[in-house]
Amino acid sequence: MESRKLYIETYGCQMNVVDSEVVAAILLQHNYQLTEEVNEADLVLINTCSIRENAEQRVRTRLRDFGKIKQQNSRVSVGIIGCMAERLKEQLLEEETMVDLVVGPDAYRDLPALLQEVESGQKGINTILSLEETYGDIRPVRMDRNNVTSFVAIMRGCDNHCAYCVVPGTRGRERSRDPETILRETRDLFDNGYREVTLLGQNVNSYQWENGKQNMTFEKLLEEVAGIDPRLRVRFATSHPKDLPDSLLEVVSRFPNLCRAIHLPVQSGSTSVLERMKRRYTREHYMERISAIKKYIPGASISTDLIAGFCGETEEEHQQTLSLMEWVGYDFAYMFKYSQRPDTFAALRYSDDVPERVKGERLTEIIELQMKLSLESKQRDVGQTFEVLVEGTSKKSENQLFGRTSQNKVVVFPKGSFSPGDYAHVRITGCTSATLIGIA
Ligand code: SAH
Ligand code: SF4
Ligand code: F3S
């Protein structure tokens, strides 16, 4: 039988990147092959994100393009997978009539069966969430193709229920993946030339695997992954500030290949806002955790996520976010305007009362401050030498390579005799707020 061509487009977080690779792995075993050309595809899948309203809007706009492709070739099937599929379920089939298939994040093993239904002219839908599914046994088909860095999912779901967040609704309950499968996948990546993995979960600190006598915590897992080979760099995301223990920082400090970069989303610098967000820590607790990072891992970079204009946020509360940013001196941040999401605690209980204009102004202030902090962070590196893992050729010049420091800062430097996957010692000679410039 002639194989069918699959085109996948991925939106949202790193977890979705891995999920698309899992989906590819499942369908490649069922007579599909991947294509990067949407016009060649028999099946178009769009792996979606619901985190903010504009993430969903982008997908709706993109669906118009796929609708046109379908008009030209009626054999093409279009499927929505991921968080939007889970959030909207049947409603998506009703609203987007050109969509044939709606599959939530825990139902990807059902794709081959659902596609058979689609082939016979029906619509396919499965949005059942699971308490156990981790796709642990499936070896994801890597689509990134830099062949140097990769993500490895170690858990799924989230039990935290931050007031603003759709993730617990779209991803279901938190569950950890069998450590044997995590280690096998990571060893495989290393043997295939990969030199960096990022262990992924919504809240990696609560990783927990129990099986008879075996009791694996995140700290132990990290030690084992770091022990695979000193040439393999290991990162992890995301840590929740309410449970980032000293014991974890101590493990990071002991292994040079555990990267000197901690991503610790704060969301707001105001204790009262954090309480409304149901983040379950205070400004002071967060500051104490930052001090611990600086004590255990001197020179570590610290990055964060911030939300501007959450429900009821006053000017004073906003100022506390700015002052905390200054105090920490973040090296990098992802910054967002609060976007009310249906059925979240915040949507049901609070009023989205910060005017759009004010949200915009506050976000701009946050972004401008971070630009200054990012530049200062890069300037501190000028004159120093860093070990850089080479990832590829710079977009701007064929003669330049780019890679990252352990602190996760991007470095551009002349090619010399280095190739992707090599470690280069690069002396930093200059910088912008986004990039370090150096010579090897
Ligand atoms: N589990 C991770 C990240 C989840 S989503 C964590 O807890 O840190 C990534 C980021 O999106 C969040 O950290 C938050 O800053 C942002 N975000 C989530 N929901 C949002 C919303 N409704 N509006 C704006 N930003 C949001
Ligand atoms: Fe969302 Fe909070 Fe879970 Fe992160 S920890 S995914 S912000 S509910
Ligand atoms: Fe990720 Fe977006 Fe879902 S951030 S978990 S794809 S809502």
Image (cartoon, rainbow, N blue to C red):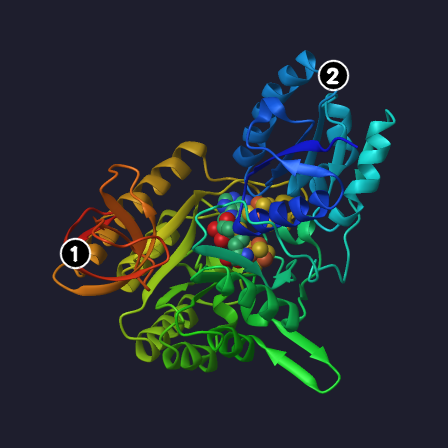
Q: Amino acid at mark 2?
A: Ser
Mark 1–mark 2 Cα distance, whole angstroms, equals 56 Å
Q: Residues within 10 Å of mark 1 (few under 14, many from 20)?
A: some
Which residue is under mark 1?
379
Question: Of callouts 1 and 2, which one flags the residue occurring earlier in the amino acid sequence?
Answer: 2
Q: Position of residue 265 (x, y in %)?
A: 44, 59
Cβ at disc 2 under 8 Å from ligand 3: no
SS under mark 2: loop
Amino acid marked by disc 1:
Gln
Residue 74 bears which disc, if any?
2
Q: Quadrant of the N terminus?
A: top right
Q: Please, what secondary structure does the residue beneath circle 1 have?
A: helix
Q: Indicate the quadrant where residue 288 lies.
A: bottom left
Q: Nearer the viewer, residue 93 or 241?
A: 93
User: Along the line of sight, which residue is nearer the eye, 379 or 186?
Assistant: 186
The image quadrant of residue 162 is: bottom right
**Quick one: which residue is furthest to the bottom in this view?**
213
